[in-house]
Image (cartoon, rainbow, N blue to C red):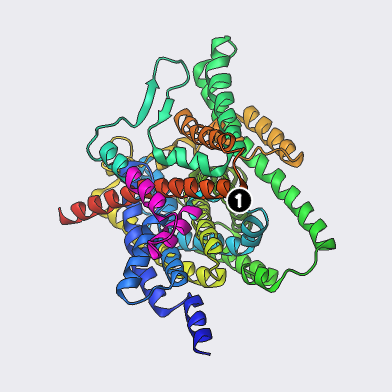
């Protein structure tokens, strides 16, 4: 009886302690994430950092329960991607010389709306992406490995994980703090149309390519070759179009492919789900306990309530509110798939696309309210990416996903409040001129949002990508990462394909080994890759925290 009670206590995850620690951690990580996104034009996943801090703090408080640590770290990290959605969109108004009348209530309403949509979408999508498709979710897998190793330093793969983490952290510190290494290796600027040629000098990118698998990484790189060498360089070299038009074609084709692939995969997954429902047996009790069962009525009611709330609070009108809500759902689906397949969450891209659609259909909406459309969608996608990563970690550790989910509800709501007040406070203190390429906060993503707010650069290329992506996805081809490669800078894609090459080399090298030996080696290399992902992310978060502290002290 006593032994059963101990096991039950060890399985308990959602506690008052985990919620309080998670809320405090979320406020801190939200502030640091907002700062680093604005100041450095990037946003590292904070999940590994949150995982380590959660385990260590709970140990100080006398808890060795890894499930409780899993809920705590999920709550802590939830606010960071909320901050990303805010930082990547709101400053676009100030960069354009607009939004001086933007209030904290408007930002807060948009942020909370996006947060709720991201959460409810993930509650519905968790069984499909994690329990059925079993996507890699490399960041979430890394978090699970980190929690497991920190919680049990005697674990077999702990030295491999900590070794990879230490190497990546040291390398990132020498690159970003000491400036001993360049950001891009083999950078060549003399190739017309390809300003980003080279390899991103990031162990994390290589590890990500290793973990997502050979096929997704190769498709990703194929997209980069098509976009950069086939379109941006090839078409001008043949004299068919100019360099500027070719660049617009590449960006538009990439956007179209991502949306088209997503639409095709949604249709394909709905057909597959219908077929499974007709012949599948009732899942086992253990399987049901690892799913979030969210009734469709609840999903519909919450989504409708958000649509009505945003329509009234932001002055969009009911039809626009419904459209934004539906688009946010679609974009969260795409974001979850991309994060699961590549570890990348292009949240601001989805925000731009929905902003353009709403601008075309609803011309009466004010410019300020229009940009908040992008905020709602970007926040929803950011929350979606983080929540699905956390749920993947929980699935690996067999933590009850419902406990995790309520922890993430608390953490993301705290993040929404902190991010909204902080972004407006920074504008009040520094002024609009502080945001943009020449300002204190370079706001790279917000600058892109401002630049593309006028419309898709090349409509024909976008339509071609939309149709082609949808057709290929319906045909069952693994093309979800193709558009990402077309759109992203070349150096990011080349780094990921190196990881895939390492994975392929190791598989072939150990092909003749015994099954047990292969499994042990794969577990060890997976632990190294997880450590590398966590180590570089950890340094990024620490740099942000130090910079934030120095700014506040000044």
Residue at 55 percent of width and 30 percent of height: 221
Residue 136 appears at what percent x and percent y?
57, 49
In the rendered image, residue 167 lying in the magenta stretch gets the answer yes
Q: Give the answer, above or below, for where 159 lies relative to 293.
A: above
Q: Residue furthest bottom?
A: 1
**Magenta span dominant secondary structure:** helix
Q: Mark 1 points at which residue?
A: 135
Residue at 40 percent of width and 14 percent of height: 190
Left or right: residue 306 versus residue 152 is right
Is residue 490 at all visible to an observer of this figure? yes
Comparing 350 with 509, the one in front is 509
Q: Give the answer, above or below, for where 99 lies relative to 77.
A: above
**Magenta region, residue range:** 141-168
Residue 326 appears at what percent x and percent y?
64, 55
Q: For the image shown, how many numbered marks are present on the structure?
A: 1
In the rendered image, residue 388 lying in the magenta stretch gets the answer no
Left or right: residue 466 versus residue 371 is right
Q: Residue furthest right?
A: 278
Label 1 SS: loop
User: Label 1 neighbourhood size at 10 Å, few (<14), some (14-19), many (20+)?
Assistant: many
Left or right: residue 217 versus residue 73 is right
Residue 165 appears at what percent x and percent y?
36, 48
Q: Residue furthest left?
A: 554
Residue at 42 percent of width and 25 percent of height: 198
Instruction: Please tell me in which quadrant of the rendered image residue 186 appears.
Output: top left
């Amino acid at each position: 009886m006593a032994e059963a009670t101990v096991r039950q206590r060890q399985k308990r995850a959602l506690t008052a302690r985990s919620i309080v620690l998670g809320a405090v951690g979320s406020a801190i990580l939200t502030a640091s994430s907002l700062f680093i996104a604005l100041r450095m034009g990037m946003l590292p996943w904070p999940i590994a950092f949150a995982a380590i801090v959660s385990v260590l703090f709970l140990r100080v408080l006398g808890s060795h329960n890894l499930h409780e640590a899993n809920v705590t770290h999920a709550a802590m990290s939830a606010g960071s991607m909320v901050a990303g959605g805010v930082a990547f969109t709101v400053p676009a108004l100030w960069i354009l010389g607009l939004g001086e009348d933007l209030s904290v209530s408007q930002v807060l309403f948009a942020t909370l709306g996006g947060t709720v949509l991201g959460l409810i979408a993930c509650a519905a999508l968790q069984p499909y992406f994690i329990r059925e498709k079993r996507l890699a979710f490399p960041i979430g897998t890394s978090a699970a490995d980190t929690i497991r190793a920190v919680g049990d330093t005697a674990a077999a793969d702990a030295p491999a994980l900590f070794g990879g983490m230490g190497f990546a952290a040291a390398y990132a510190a020498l690159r970003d703090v000491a400036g001993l290494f360049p950001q891009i290796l083999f950078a060549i600027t003399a190739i017309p149309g390809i300003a980003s040629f080279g390899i991103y000098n990031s162990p994390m990118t290589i590890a990500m390519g290793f973990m997502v698998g050979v096929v997704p990484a190769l498709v990703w790189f194929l997209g980069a070759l098509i976009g950069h060498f086939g379109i941006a360089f090839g078409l001008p070299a043949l004299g068919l179009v100019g360099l500027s038009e070719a660049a617009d074609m590449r960006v538009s084709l990439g956007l179209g492919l991502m949306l088209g692939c997503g639409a095709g995969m949604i249709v394909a997954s709905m057909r597959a789900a219908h077929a499974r429902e007709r012949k599948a047996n009732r899942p086992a009790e253990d399987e049901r306990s690892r799913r979030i069962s969210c009734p469709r009525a609840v999903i519909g009611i919450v989504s409708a309530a958000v649509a009505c709330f945003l329509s009234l609070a932001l002055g969009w009108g009911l039809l626009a509110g419904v459209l934004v809500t539906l688009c946010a759902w679609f974009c969260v689906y795409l974001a979850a798939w991309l994060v699961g397949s590549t570890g990348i969450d292009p949240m601001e891209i989805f925000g731009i696309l929905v902003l353009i659609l709403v601008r075309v259909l609803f011309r009466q909406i004010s410019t300020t309210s229009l940009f908040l459309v992008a905020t709602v969608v970007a926040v929803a996608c950011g929350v979606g990416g983080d929540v699905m990563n956390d749920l993947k970690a929980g699935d690996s550790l067999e933590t009850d996903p419902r406990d995790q989910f309520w922890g993430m509800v608390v953490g993301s709501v705290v993040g929404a409040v902190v991010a909204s007040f902080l972004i407006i406070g920074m504008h009040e203190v520094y002024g609009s001129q502080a945001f943009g390429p020449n300002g204190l906060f370079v706001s790279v993503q917000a600058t892109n949002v401002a630049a593309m707010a006028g419309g898709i650069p090349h409509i024909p290329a976008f339509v071609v990508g939309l149709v082609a992506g949808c057709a290929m996805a319906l045909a069952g081809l693994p093309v979800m990462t193709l558009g990402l490669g077309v759109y992203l800078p070349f150096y990011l894609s080349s780094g990921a394909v190196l990881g895939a090459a390492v994975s392929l080399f190791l598989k072939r090298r150990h092909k003749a080994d015994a099954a047990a030996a292969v499994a042990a080696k794969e577990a060890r290399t997976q632990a190294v890759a997880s450590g590398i992902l966590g180590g570089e992310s950890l340094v990024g978060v620490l740099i942000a925290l130090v910079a934030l502290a120095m700014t506040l002290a000044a």
